[in-house]
Amino acid sequence: MNIELHFFKTLMPESRKADFYLGCLDGAVFMDFNISSDNIISLVRISFDGYGCCTLDGHAKCLTITDSQEFLNEIEKEILHQERMAFLIKEIIKINQDLIWKDALEEYGLLCDVRNRS
């Protein structure tokens, strides 16, 4: 699938607590992430225009240590490396796909093959 996701850092209201926030697809999708005391990244919630907010309620699987470190390296940059972020986001969605609305993931092109790292 050849969708231009274009990830960007953003902020959310105080009522939507998380450590990091990313948006993509011109603000049609927003994702909230937490970092553990061991610097491991987990997906807290993901919201989709037309679907609402899907909260993973602490059941989310985390990125690996290596992928978490790569996520942290990228999130610190002023300009995100789009291909690296796409790999990391699709990876965290893939490992948590059973907790996220499949129809929303399909509509927004976020359920893809993540074998190739850019």
Image (cartoon, grey):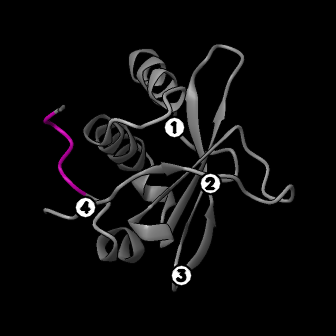
Residue 20: image location, x then y, percent? 64, 40
Label 1 sits on a secondary structure element that is: loop
Earlier in the chain: of badge 4 and badge 3, it is 4
Looking at marks 1 and 4 on the same chain, the residue that comes earlier in the sequence is marked by 4
Q: Label 2 to label 3, Cα distance in Å?
A: 15 Å
Mark 4 residue crowding within 10 angstroms, few (<14) / some (14–19) / many (20+): few
| Label 3: which secondary element | loop
Residue at mark 1? 61
**Mark earlier in primary sequence (2, 1):** 2
Q: Secondary structure at mark 2?
A: loop
> In the shown orientation, is residue 5 left or right of residue 99?
left
Q: Residue drawn at (47%, 20%), measured in percent from left and top?
A: 73
Question: Magenta part mainly helix, strand or loop?
Answer: loop
Residue 4 badge: 4
Which amino acid type corresponds to the residue marked 4 in the rendered image?
A: Glu
Does residue 101 show up? no
The C terminus lies in which quarter of the figure?
Answer: top left
Task: Work out how far the residue at label 3 is from the one at label 1, CA to CA, in angstroms.
Answer: 22 Å
Quick check: 94 above or below 87? below
Residue 115 belongs to magenta span: yes
Does residue 52 appear anywhere in the picture?
Answer: yes
Mark 3, residue position: 51
* Residue range (magenta): 112-116
Is the residue marked by circle 3 packed among few (<14), some (14-19), or many (20+) residues within 10 Å?
few
Mark 4: secondary structure: loop
Q: Which residue is mark 2?
A: 56
Is label 1 or label 4 in front? 4
Which sits in the foreground, 117 or 10? 10
